[in-house]
Image (cartoon, rainbow, N blue to C red):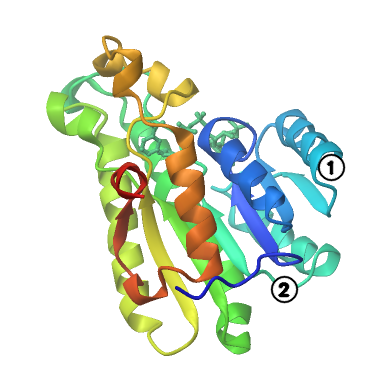
C-alpha cells in the first residue's frame, strides 16, 4: 500500500455530469485533486464543477466533449494539459446502454454500434490521447469503469453494451501487460449495480429491493485507492468494488 497523496494531482473524469461519474469526481475533489469533467451536456458538468468549487476549492475544468469524436477528444486533451497540466489520472466512466431491452435480431444495428462507439471507442480515444505523456513521465493511472453486463447476459439483449464492455476489459488487460515497468497502471473497476439513470432504464433491474443495489461509495473508494497507487500490483486486472467494500 503506497498511500500517495492526491493533493494537487490532475485528474480527468468522463461522464462526470451525473450518476457514478459525478460521485467519482466529488470523491477525487475531496482528496484535493484538480479535475477536468467531461460529458456532452455542458450544463451538467458545469453544475458539478460549481459544487466542487464551493465544497472543496481547487481547479475544475468542465468540458462539453463527445467521447466518440477523435477531434473533440484531441482538442480536449490539449486544453487540459494547457489549463491544468500533465494528467495523473484518467477515469473512463462515460457510457451508455441501448434505450430498449430487445433481442439482437430485433435491435437497431446503428443504435448498438453507437453504444460500442461510446463505451469502447471513447475510452480508447481518451486513453490514446492522454497516456503517452504518462509513459514519458513514468507515472499515471487509467481506470476503466467495467461491467460484467449481467443484465445483458441474463436476457440476451443489450448486445452493444455487452460487447463493448467485454472489449473494454480486453483493452485493459492488453495495456496492463504492455505497460509493465513504465510506471503507468491501467485497471478495471466494477461498480456492481448502482442506482442511476442508466440502471433505472433497464427493466431487468426493476424489481430490485433497495438493499440489492450497491453503493456508489464502493466504486469511489476503489477509484481513489487506485489513484493513490494502492492497487499498482494488480495492473491490468478487474477490481470488484462492492466485494472490496464488503471486505474493508
Ligand atoms: N449503474 C450501474 O449499475 C453500472 C453497472 C456497471 C457499470 N456501469 C458503468 O458505469 C458508468 C457510468 O454509468 P451510470 O450508471 O452512472 O450512467 P449515467 O447515470 O447514465 O451517466 C452516464 C454519463 O456518461 C455521459 N456520457 C454518455 N455518453 C457520452 C458521450 N458520448 N460523451 C461524453 N459523455 C457521455 C453522460 O452525460 P451526457 O449524456 O451529458 O453525455 C453521463 O454523465 C458507465 O460506463 C456504465 O456502463 C454502471
**Residue 24 x/y as whole percent:** 57, 44
Whether residue 183 is situated above or below residue 65 in the rendered picture:
below
Whether residue 25 is situated above or below residue 153 in the rendered picture:
below
Are there few (<14), some (14-19), or many (20+) residues within 10 Å of tag 2? some
Q: Is residue 90 visible?
A: yes
Closest to the observer: 73 or 183?
183
Farthest residue, direction front:
248
The answer to whether 83 appears left or right of 80 in the picture is right
The answer to whether 47 appears left or right of 220 in the picture is right
Q: Residue at x 31, y 79 (%)?
A: 177
Q: Residue at x 80, y 50 (%)?
A: 60
* Label ID, residue 169: none
> Looking at the rendering, in which quadrant would you find the N terminus?
bottom left
**Disc 1 marks which residue?**
53
Q: Image quarter for residue 155?
A: top left
* Label ID, residue 86: 2
Specify which label sits upstream in the sequence, 2 or 1. Answer: 1
Number of residue marks: 2
**Residue 76 x/y as whole percent:** 72, 57
Disc 2, SS: loop
Closest to the observer: 142 or 102?
142
Disc 1, SS: helix
Front: mark 2 or 1? 1
**Residue 226 x/y as whole percent:** 48, 63
Q: Is residue 118 visible?
A: no
Q: Is mark 2 within 8 Å of ligand 1?
A: no
Q: Image quarter for residue 187?
A: bottom left
Label 2 vs label 1: CA separation?
21 Å
Q: Residue at x 29, y 13 (%)?
A: 209
Amino acid at each position: 500500500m503506497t498511500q500517495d497523496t492526491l493533493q494537487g494531482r490532475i485528474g480527468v473524469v468522463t461522464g462526470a455530469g451525473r450518476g457514478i461519474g459525478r460521485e467519482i469526481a466529488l470523491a477525487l475533489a475531496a482528496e484535493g485533486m484538480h479535475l477536468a469533467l467531461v460529458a456532452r451536456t455542458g450544463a451538467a458538468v458545469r453544475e458539478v464543477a460549481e459544487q466542487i468549487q464551493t465544497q472543496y476549492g481547487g481547479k475544475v475544468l468542465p468540458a462539453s466533449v463527445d467521447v466518440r469524436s477523435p477531434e473533440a477528444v484531441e482538442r480536449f486533451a490539449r486544453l487540459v494539459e494547457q489549463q491544468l497540466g500533465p494528467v495523473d489520472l484518467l477515469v473512463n466512466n462515460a457510457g451508455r446502454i441501448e434505450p430498449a431491452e430487445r433481442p439482437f435480431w430485433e435491435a437497431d444495428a446503428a443504435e448498438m454500434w453507437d453504444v460500442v462507439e461510446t463505451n469502447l471507442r471513447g475510452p480508447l480515444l481518451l486513453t490514446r490521447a492522454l497516456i503517452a505523456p504518462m509513459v514519458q513521465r513514468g507515472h499515471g493511472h487509467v481506470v476503466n469503469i467495467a461491467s460484467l453486463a449481467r443484465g445483458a447476459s441474463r436476457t440476451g439483449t443489450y448486445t452493444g453494451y455487452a460487447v463493448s464492455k467485454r472489449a473494454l476489459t480486453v483493452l485493459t488487460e492488453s495495456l496492463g501487460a504492455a505497460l509493465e515497468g513504465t510506471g503507468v497502471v491501467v485497471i478495471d473497476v466494477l461498480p456492481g449495480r448502482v442506482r442511476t439513470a442508466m440502471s433505472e432504464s433497464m427493466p431487468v433491474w426493476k424489481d430490485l429491493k433497495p438493499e440489492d443495489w450497491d453503493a456508489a461509495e464502493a466504486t469511489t473508494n476503489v477509484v481513489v485507492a487506485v489513484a493513490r497507487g494502492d492497487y499498482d500490483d494488480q495492473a491490468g486486472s478487474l477490481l470488484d468494488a462492492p466485494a472490496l467494500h464488503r471486505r474493508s
